[in-house]
Amino acid sequence: MRFKDIGLAGKLSLGFGSVLAVVALSSAFTYASVKNVAEVERLNTASNLIQDEVDQAWGSMARSQAAVRKYVLTAAASDKAKVDAGITAFRDHVAKARAALVADAPVFVADLDAYRTASEAYLNQAILQEVRLATDPATRPQAVDMVSSSTTAPLSAAMDAAETVIETKVDTWSDTFTEAGDTAMHAIVLTVMAASLASVLVGILMAWCITRAVGIPLSTMTRAMRRLAEGDNAVTVPALGQKDELGQMAAAVQVFKDSALAKLRAEAEAAEARREAEALRREAEAAQAEAARQQGEVVDAVSSGLDHLAKGDLTFRLDQSLAPDYEKLRHDFNAALNTLQDAMRMVASNAAAIRAGTNEISTASDDLSRRTEQQAASLEETAAALDEITATVKKTAEGSNHARSAVATAKTDAERSGAVVGRAVAAMTGIEASSKQIGQIIGVIDEIAFQTNLLALNAGVEAAR
């Protein structure tokens, strides 16, 4: 795990823990060194005590030697008491020295025992013997001779040699502890200095690491948050992806940034939607105006055509081009007028033919009437001439056949006129259907206009929303 991914509490704990670990290690080493120094000091004290006890024993022995010489000369009880006190003190100091050696330096016990043995031999064979001889006046001269002679010199020399051995060894041993104590104290000083320096270095290192891992990113995060609060959404959020508190803070700041960007995008999309709605509204209004204009043109053109038709002008045509959606209506209207004109032309022609046939029938009837009058006037003369009556009857029959033929022709012309009138009625029906289609188209245009207005209203409501 990277150091920057460790939590803030972990970083601080690691930093202080490192310093504390260095302090603890140095303290442990210092404690061990101090304990060692204490032990060395104790042994040094013990060695000094042993030295002092050996020296005190030697001094007590020397005082006993001086006191016994004086006692031999004076026989004073006080001098004997000094001898006894010196011997007691000697033995007491030797016992204490031996106890100390047994506890701390058993290797020197044998040397001390040799010194004690030599001392006890000197005491028993010299000093105590001299005291016994000096106590009795009869043997005092022997005591004087013994003190002044060299018979006890070997015993004294052996004791001094043993004392020198033990004292030399104890002194050497004591000096060793003194040097060890000095070395240990020097080591403690060096350890404390090294531990202090290590603690300072580790503290500086951890402070630098924590500053780089926490302080600098926190300052950078603060600047980024300040810029984001000021509306700078292009700022780069630091510490993204880290597992510590700064990473969590960066994730939260990124959410704020994304929200701000989303808000800006929403506002931009809303503005774009408003612009598109406004454009659609203008297009709808333009389309509505264009449809109204085209509808007006169609209504004006059809109204003009119907006005001419109402006035009987069958030659009028819608020559001006209309909108593509109304071109078929113009062509149907012109075709209906063409059909109506042809039908009316045929009706006029048939009417003229009927009028001509009727005139012929009337003429034939007049001729027949005149001939009938003539025949009635000449009936009286028919009897006179059968040939003339027969000829007249033949002419009359021929006139009747001619009249019957004229009536059949008139009937045929009348039937054709009825067909023409039917076609005219059908043309008028077509005109009526075309007018209905025009009405339906106008209704569709009104519906389109209503739907366009409704769409524009919905677009306005959506834009406002």
Image (tube, helix red, strand yellow):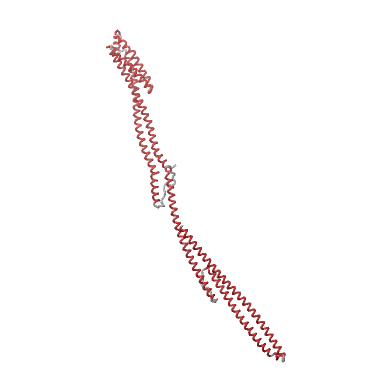
Q: Is residue 217 left or right of residue 304?
A: left
Give residue 133's position: percent from left, percent from top: 31, 10
Residue drawn at 63 percent across, 84 percent down: 362
Q: Nearer the viewer, residue 457 or 135?
A: 457
The correct choice, above or below, for 43 with respect to 70 in the image is below
Which of the 4 image quarters holds residue 191?
top left
The correct choice, above or below, for 80 with respect to 290 in the image is above
Residue drawn at 38 percent across, 33 percent down: 27
Q: Nearer the viewer, residue 333 or 153?
A: 333
Q: Nearer the viewer, residue 384 or 248?
A: 384
Q: Is residue 462 left or right of residue 437?
A: left
State how many labels appear: 0
The correct choice, above or below, for 185 with respect to 6 in the image is above
Q: Is residue 104 left or right of residue 402?
A: left
Which of the 4 image quarters holds residue 182?
top left
Give residue 266's position: percent from left, percent from top: 45, 55
Q: Nearer the viewer, residue 42 or 271?
A: 271
The correct choice, above or below, for 43 with respect to 117 in the image is below
Residue drawn at 49 percent across, 67 percent down: 292
Give residue 141's position: percent from left, percent from top: 29, 9
Outermost residue, top side: 138
Quarter the N terminus occupies = top left
Give residue 417's position: percent from left, percent from top: 61, 77
Q: Is residue 274 left or right of residue 199?
A: right
